[in-house]
Image (cartoon, helix red, strand yellow):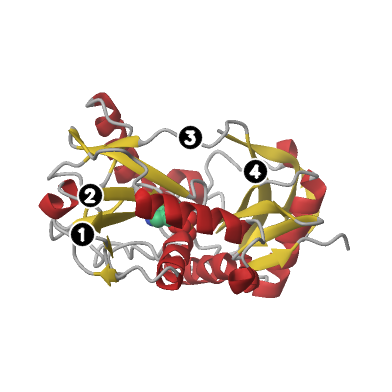
Amino acid sequence: MAITAPFLWLDGTLVDSAAATMPMMAHAPQRGSLVFDVGSFHPVKLGVAMFRAREHVARFVRSAKIVGLALAYDEEALLRAANDVVVAADRDEGLIRWSVYFASSEPDLLPRDASTHVAVAAQLLQDPPRTTPIRIATFDDARKAAPEALSPEAKVAAAYLGPMLARKRAIAAGADDVVLLDDQGFIAESPISNVFAVSKGVLWTPPLGRVLPGITRDAVLALAAAEGIEVREAPLTREAFAAADEAFLSGTSLPIAAIGAIDGRELGSAPGPVTARLTSRLVAAQRGEDPAFAEWLTRVVRR
Ligand code: PMP
């Protein structure tokens, strides 16, 4: 579980998080129109650094554009806000959450008042990351919205409702999480993570266009290339996924979670060798221990 740090950045100032509330009738909760992005910060030698914060901010700006939320702050201001909430949190590890939402208290489908608020918060993880492999369920009728219905690139609150119900269903079926199919029946992604499979030494992941362009997904692909692992970004059938030698989820809060079973079939000893190699490279990169990927880090500074 993540708890919000005592101070968050709201429209340019640091405020008490508990005082940052939203009207009951606001469009964001009533219609799910709030757009957000989640990045992370980590301890590095002599300080703290945000991992790929520029990419998170750029994706946040793209999501807001897709949903039609005007952002009054540019990418540099959103990065500075993140820096400042991490400094105020006074911790060396956690998540950063950027949100933009209609200020309007009209719950009507299209608010007349299009002005927005922007909040940036540091969140602290209460539980240690899970180290045991997770069990995945898939269902033929647990699918992502078709890209024509809602772009998979928009991190908007409303997009998480179907995946939330699918995760509940997976847990009721004895698994830990679900992997959703896309509208054509291929493997897509989990509610809040991308999916990878390893088969005969080749690393597979579904192509962009039907899944969120995960920043951890991108990091895994870059690290796999550096490791000389063959990669295919190509449609993955449910059958091929279930028959994989290794599989894992990737996402900011994980950053890699080994999958131990798919639809009841055990995958052998998880994490497998490819998953373990990529996990240690990724954790090293996040902690500034991999000079080849030093540009992924933005050092947090007191201003
Ligand atoms: N897919 C979805 C739908 C997500 O919400 C997330 C979490 N942002 C991911 C994948 C993983 O993305 P990232 O690696 O950027 O956290």
Q: How far is disc 4 from disc 1 in space, using C-alphas?
A: 39 Å
Dot 4 amino acid type: Gln
Q: Position of residue 193 (x, y in %)?
A: 39, 51
What's the residue at 50%, 63% (across, down)?
A: 112
Q: Label 4's element?
A: strand
Q: How far is disc 2 from disc 4 in space, using C-alphas?
A: 35 Å
Q: How far is disc 1 from disc 3 in space, using C-alphas?
A: 27 Å
Q: Kindly check if marks 4 and 1 are in contact, taking CB atoms under 8 A apart as contact.
A: no
Dot 1 amino acid type: Lys
Comparing 16 with 289, the one in front is: 289
Q: Which residue is mark 2?
A: 245
Q: How far is disc 4 from disc 3 in space, using C-alphas?
A: 17 Å
Ligand 1 within 8 Å of disc 1? The answer is: no
Q: Which residue is mark 1?
A: 200
Q: Which residue is mark 3?
A: 130
Q: Which of the two labelled residues, at mark 4 and mark 3, occupies the earlier sequence position?
A: 4
Q: Kindly check if marks 2 and 1 are in contact, taking CB atoms under 8 A apart as contact.
A: yes
Q: Of tags 3 and 2, which is closer to the observer?
A: 2
Query: Where, quadrant-wise, is the C terminus in this rendering?
Result: bottom right
What's the residue at 56%, 65% (across, down)?
A: 56
Residue 258 is drawn in which quadrant?
Answer: top left
Residue 123 — which label? Answer: 4
Q: Which of the two labelled residues, at mark 2 and mark 1, occupies the earlier sequence position?
A: 1
What's the residue at 27%, 55% (across, down)?
A: 197
